[in-house]
Amino acid sequence: MTDKILSFLTERGCSVPRIGLLQPADPFLDTAGEDLRRRIFLTADQAGASLCLRPEFTIPVCLAHVADPREPARYAYAGTVFRQRRDEPAEFSQAGIEDLGDPDEAGADARSLADAMALLRHVAPAADWRVTLGDQAVFDAVIRALGLPDGWRKKLVRSFGSPEKVEGLLAALGAPRERANGLPPAISAALEAGEEPALRAAIAESMASLGFPAAVSRTPRDIAARMLEQAALDNARLGEDQIGELRDFLAIEVPLDRAGAALRAFSARLGGGMDRVLEAFEARVARIAELDVDISRIAYDAAFGRPLDYYSGLVFEIGLAGADRPVAGGGRYDRLLTLLGARQPIPGVGFSVWLDRLPIDRALKGDAA
């Protein structure tokens, strides 16, 4: 089966990189977070370096591209991966395409979605597919328009796609501020006033009184900057109207052909300022439509995202109508290759298909997986 899928993908202009079964574990843990550790199969080499059985293909493909960049480049893969999943086998097959280095983001995004849909139609032509699309950049633009400090903005963006986490952060943003801080009065007063010189002086005096030399640990300047940053987060609050606006945004769910108008109307409610990101959104929708994809059958869900730092724009998933689990997912991850060591930012977008969740067409069965 994988041979026929790879043949289909290479016909779409992709090369097939050699991706080893054992991979360095740190790139996966550094980019996906420590929560991944309990779901991957870890081991070590003779020197003690952490390795893991390949949990997915995107990061190894990107690492291979960083080591030997040829831009733009399209890579296809199909093979076995290993990751703990609830109620499903931990060893399963994935296939997909990673599209790296193409500066035409709208075109590459549209191609990625169209390629994923074409592969699914190839392996299961009679299936009824549902497609959901979201946009990390639109959510980020909404948060910016609400005027939150960068720290809160980053927290919300990192939680986007996890309704429970987003709701918890909204509850914290709407809660009354706790005033007690247990700090010495001089430090507390300077912090409350937001006066950095006075805060540095109070911290330096406190350190000296406790016998901490100025050259040890962090300097009063470093401590004051961190305390002011944390205070900005602690002090930031959204009013009921602003929280209501954010909830209204997250409730937007319309066919993709109506999404641009819905987002323009919502931006007007916030006073505008989202033109650049909405122009990019609309350009992508237009390019998807040019690829003979029926955009009226794609759902735009404003609350759909991925709680990973490196996703930066388009996100999508495809599933069988009436099924709970997606069979394919993808998106734009422009920040990923820099995190993996690229010297310059490299745009990237891709998708993966979970082959074990597919109703495979009879003609594709019989190959060795």
Image: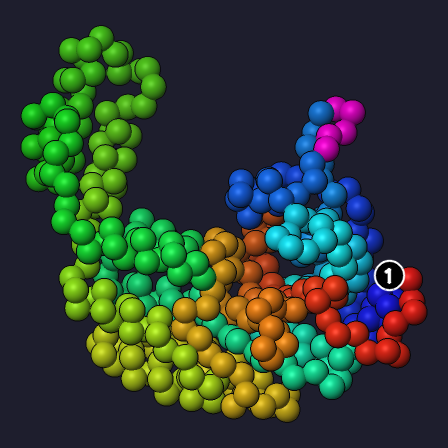
- Locate the C terminus by quadrant: bottom right
Q: Can residue 12 be seen in this view?
A: no
Crowding near pointer 1: few (<14 within 10 Å), some, many (20+)? some
Q: Is residue 248 above or below residue 32?
A: below
**SS assignment at label 1:** loop
Q: In this view, does 186 lie to the left or right of 213?
A: left
Question: What residue does disc 1 label?
Answer: 369
Frontmost residue, 87 versus 195: 87
Dominant secondary structure, magenta = loop
Name the quadrant containing residue 201: top left
In the rendered structure, which amino acid carries the disc numbered 1? Ala
Frontmost residue, 122 versus 58: 122
Q: Which residue is drawn at 67% across and 75% down?
A: 116
Q: In this view, does 311 lie to the left or right of 64?
A: left
Question: Which region shows up in magenta?
Answer: 43-47
Q: In this view, does 197 lie above or below 300?
A: above
Q: Can residue 336 be seen in this view?
A: yes
Q: Which residue is drawn at 58% across and 90% down?
A: 294
